[in-house]
């Protein structure tokens, strides 16, 4: 197993608060890794560290053995890490197609002109949104905005895809479509890190899971094993009691 | 030694002006580019009362400050609040307020020119020398400095010892959380903005005792106040005072040893260094 | 190239040709207004290329303009005039790049403040230099006439339009539209946002400096207070925003009426020009947030909707 992405000793402090503490894990090629844990356990912060949205306090993150931590987000994106945002971020003045072209033109594999447009169309096809290509993004339904964002990250042919609660806020029908979509990406052999709360999605999509609680890794292993783990169950139940 | 004291005296008055701007930008979150015109208006008031009624500028402060408070309150409620309400993002509000307060600044200059003419104005008040450690200083500068310290001190006490002051500091840190603990954010913002205007106008009345002003010098003071606020840290009272004194000393240094025409250039140099090295301000905590 | 593009290029060429004919038919007064309009067209259009999509309000126009004026003023003694224009452009672009590197990573407020003081900063340094060296203003004596200046400005305006047209269709143009919409997305999509902003800011820097260099012969006598008038920066901002920055042709739509209005007001009530500037800012913010372009396109959209219903 060759690691595409590896974190070692990754730590993030905000003032006195340790949001991510000495985190270690690896993601193998073609693997879908679930990054799970109760609210506030540091999952999203971890994604922000990987994508470069936040700088690390200590530790390193490497992509295929070369260090990416310390680089600005645009350089990390160019090296092949693409992400979606927890709160969907689209480009409001542009059409659906242009939104996706942003990824095709400036991502890991860069294209321009008709080639970029064709790539963007292909990605829209993949997420099932080709017929809305020329619509302004303001007219889209919620799940369609998520599809656009996913297509944008795919358009640059990234080596690793970071999905930050991509399934959150969908209704049951949409959720089914969403899971099917990510399953299709998995079957293409993409490498994905999934921060997710939806248990059904985690069970059906993830090969392995890393479980975080209060900033630290408390378990790691195959999805079935991890979800049986005593410490994991406690962490989730404990969080439920607090809430 | 001479330079340091003169700079300190100048910096004290700068601090007062910059505190006014910091109340408006740091607390009420409005970058008021018409701040300098408030200062000039305060100066005009002092000039007018002195030449017309021989009223001491120190007493004029008590007339000018409440007046500026009222005018700035009105400006905030009538002109700026609609912008705060319609803004979809912080960036849009920023652009809108910059353009609007520039507009207000030009209108204020236009109105002052119409009322008082475009000439320089100055008057002689307490222009007697005082001796201190072998050097002489204008009494007016010393008195202005002392008054600035008094007003600044009162402001500090109010911000840090009174309930209303605490509410103002709370909205500076986080308007959203302030609302959750029951602070009337629109009201307090308006008050902070108006108070900022009052402090600046008071500073204007004091400055006019030893500097020559004219209707269009406001923008120079706005610039200096902005540089001080950014250098000291937005919303940071202590930083503002330190930065103002630093700027006062630097300006005096440059004016005395190189050329009085280069004071702004010197301020800018300091500004660039701050931007490159510590964009979060002298005492600001880094984002990372 | 799409059909629409060819059509707009053709139309622009036609307008240019008609405009170029002005000196042949007009008197001196009309020509001087023509020069002013051409000058502001260059300044406002290039200003909007950067400030429109990025929302960074630049008040550095006067600084770049003055740099250009002084390039001609100082250089005319030593170099042929035609060489001074590109030199001015390079100087303007370099200063813009320096300013950009220092401020464009930060929020818009810092940028506004910095550019606001830039003209004054350079003016103070030049004045100081003159005091030290004992020199006063500079005489710029050339055989260049008002007509020549007008044609040169028109040529520059054509270049700015062509450049804007090409940039709009380039990767750089796409990048700046993305970062204008959402800087976070731009960065995570792989766009080096700081570099894009600095590169784009060099355009108004270069254009304003060349404009200043072209106008220097008109002043005959150049001194710091003429070359670096802060008012110029504000007028350019107002004209560009009044016209609208959403389209390449937007700023011109603001330049023409505002120049005429300014001429009229400063002729009859010279003391009230600042009041006019102030009011214009408020009108833009409260009544015309998207400028005349927004008004025109809104009207067109309504007409289309009305037509569809009928």
Image (tube, coloured by chain):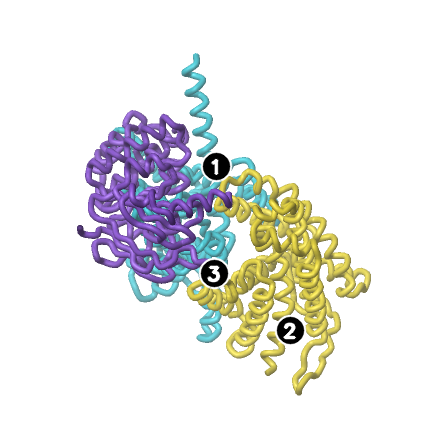
Residue wearing tag 1:
C291
Q: Which residue is mark 3?
A: A15
Q: Give the residue at the far left of this rendering.
A: A1
The secondary structure type at the circle numbered 1 is helix
Q: Residues within 10 Å of mark 2 (few under 14, many from 20)?
A: many
Q: Residue at x 47, y 34 (%)?
A: C292
Q: Residue at x 48, y 68 (%)?
A: B270
The reply to whether residue B76 is visible in this rendering is no
B26 to the left or right of B114: left
Image x and y of residue B40, in percent: 66, 58
| Rendered position, B107 above or below C132 | above
Residue B66 percent coordinates (x, y): 74, 54
Establish whether labels 1 and 2 are both on one chain.
Answer: no
Q: Which chain is assigned yellow?
A: B
Badge 2 is on which residue?
Answer: B9
Tell me residue C289's x, y (percent): 50, 37
Judging from the image, mark 3 belongs to the subunit labelled: A
Query: x, y (%) of residue C238?
Result: 49, 44
C250, B275: nearer the viewer = B275
From the viewer's perspective, is C177 left or right of B81? left
Q: Is residue C136 above or below residue B287?
A: below
Tell me if I can see residue B109 in this picture. yes
Task: State which mark lies toward you, 3 or 2.
Answer: 3
View extreme (top): residue = C310
Separation of residues labelled 1 and 2 (CA atoms):
47 Å
Characterize the local packing of mark 3: few (<14), some (14-19) or many (20 or more) Cα atoms within 10 angstroms: few
Q: According to the rendering, which colour does chain A have?
A: purple
Rendered shade, chain C: cyan
The quadrant of the picture occupied by the N terminus of chain C is top left
- Residue A184, by quadrant, is top left
């Amino acid at each position: 197993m060759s690691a595409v992405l590896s974190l070692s000793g990754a730590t993030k402090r905000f003032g006195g608060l340790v949001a991510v503490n000495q985190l270690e894990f690896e993601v193998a090629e073609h693997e879908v890794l679930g990054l799970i844990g109760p609210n506030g356990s540091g999952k999203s912060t971890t994604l922000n560290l990987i994508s470069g949205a936040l700088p690390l306090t200590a530790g390193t993150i490497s992509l295929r053995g070369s260090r990416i931590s310390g680089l600005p987000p645009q350089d990390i994106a160019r090296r092949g890490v693409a992400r979606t945002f927890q709160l969907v971020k689209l480009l409001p003045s542009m059409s659906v197609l242009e939104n996706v072209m942003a990824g095709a033109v400036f991502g890991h594999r860069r294209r321009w002109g008709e080639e970029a447009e064709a790539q963007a169309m292909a990605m829209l096809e993949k997420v099932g949104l080709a017929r809305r290509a020329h619509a302004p993004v303001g007219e889209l339904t919620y799940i369609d905005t998520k599809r656009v964002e996913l297509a944008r990250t795919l358009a640059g042919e990234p080596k690793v895809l970071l999905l930050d609660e991509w399934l959150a806020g969908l209704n049951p029908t949409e959720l089914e479509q969403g899971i099917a979509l990510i399953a299709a990406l998995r079957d293409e052999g993409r490498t994905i890190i999934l921060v997710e709360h939806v248990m059904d999605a985690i069970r059906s999509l993830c090969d392995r899971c890393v479980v975080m609680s209060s900033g630290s890794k408390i378990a790691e292993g195959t999805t079935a094993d991890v979800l049986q783990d005593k410490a994991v169950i406690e962490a989730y139940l404990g969080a439920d009691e607090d809430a | 030694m001479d330079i340091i004291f003169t700079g300190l005296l100048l910096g004290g008055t700068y601090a007062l002006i910059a505190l006014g701007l910091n109340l408006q930008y740091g607390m009420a979150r409005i970058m008021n580019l018409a701040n300098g015109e408030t200062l000039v208006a305060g100066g005009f008031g002092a000039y007018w009362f002195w030449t017309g009624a021989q009223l001491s500028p120190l007493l004029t402060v008590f007339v000018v400050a409440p007046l500026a408070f009222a005018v700035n309150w009105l400006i905030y409620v009538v002109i700026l609040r609609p912008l705060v309400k319609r803004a979809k993002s912080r960036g849009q509000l920023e652009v809108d307020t910059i353009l609007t307060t520039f507009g207000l600044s030009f209108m204020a200059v236009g109105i002052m020119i119409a009322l008082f003419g475009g000439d320089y104005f100055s008057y002689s008040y307490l222009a007697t020398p005082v001796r201190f450690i072998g050097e002489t200083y204008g009494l007016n500068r010393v008195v202005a400095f002392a008054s600035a310290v008094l007003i600044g001190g009162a402001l500090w006490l109010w911000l840090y010892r009174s309930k209303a002051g605490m509410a103002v500091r709370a909205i500076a840190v986080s308007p959203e959380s302030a609302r959750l603990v029951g602070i009337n954010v629109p009201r307090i913002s308006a008050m902070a903005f108006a108070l900022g205007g009052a402090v600046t106008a008071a500073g204007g009345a004091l400055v006019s005792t030893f500097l020559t002003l004219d209707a269009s010098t406001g923008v120079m003071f706005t610039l200096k106040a902005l540089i001080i606020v950014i250098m000291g840290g937005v919303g940071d009272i202590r930083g503002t005072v330190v930065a103002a004194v630093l700027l006062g000393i630097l300006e005096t240094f440059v004016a005395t040893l190189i050329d009085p025409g280069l004071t702004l250039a010197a301020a800018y140099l300091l500004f660039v260094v701050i931007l490159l090295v510590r964009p979060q301000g002298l005492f600001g905590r880094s984002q990372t | 190239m799409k059909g629409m593009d060819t059509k707009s290029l053709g139309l622009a060429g036609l307008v240019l040709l008609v405009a170029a004919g002005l000196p042949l038919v007009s008197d001196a007064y009309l020509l001087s207004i023509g020069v002013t309009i051409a000058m502001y067209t260059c300044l406002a259009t290039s200003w909007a290329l950067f400030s429109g999509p990025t929302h960074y309000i630049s008040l550095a126009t006067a600084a770049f303009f003055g740099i250009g004026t002084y390039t001609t003023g100082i250089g005319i003694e030593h170099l042929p005039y035609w060489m001074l224009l590109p030199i001015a452009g390079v100087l303007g672009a370099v200063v813009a790049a320096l300013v950009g590197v220092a401020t464009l990573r930060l929020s818009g407020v810092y940028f506004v403040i910095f550019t606001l003081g830039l003209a004054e900063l350079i003016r103070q340094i030049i004045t100081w230099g003159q005091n030290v060296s004992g020199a006063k203003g500079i005489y710029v004596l050339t055989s260049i006439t008002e007509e020549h200046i007008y044609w040169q400005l028109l040529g520059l305006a054509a270049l700015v339009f062509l450049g804007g047209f090409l940039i709009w269709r380039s990767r750089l143009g796409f990048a700046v539209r993305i970062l204008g919409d959402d800087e976070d997305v731009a960065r995570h999509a792989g766009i080096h946002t700081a570099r894009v902003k600095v590169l784009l800011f060099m355009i108004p820097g270069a254009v304003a400096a060349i404009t200043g260099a072209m106008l220097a012969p008109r002043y005959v006598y150049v001194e710091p207070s003429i070359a670096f008038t802060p008012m110029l920066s504000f007028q350019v901002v107002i004209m560009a925003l009044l016209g609208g920055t959403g389209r390449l042709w937007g700023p011109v739509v603001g330049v023409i009426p505002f120049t005429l209005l300014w001429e009229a007001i400063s002729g009859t009530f010279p003391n009230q020009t600042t009041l006019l500037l102030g009011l214009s800012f408020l009108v833009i913010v409260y009544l015309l947030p998207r400028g005349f372009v927004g008004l025109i396109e809104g009207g067109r959209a309504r007409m289309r909707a009305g037509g569809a219903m009928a």
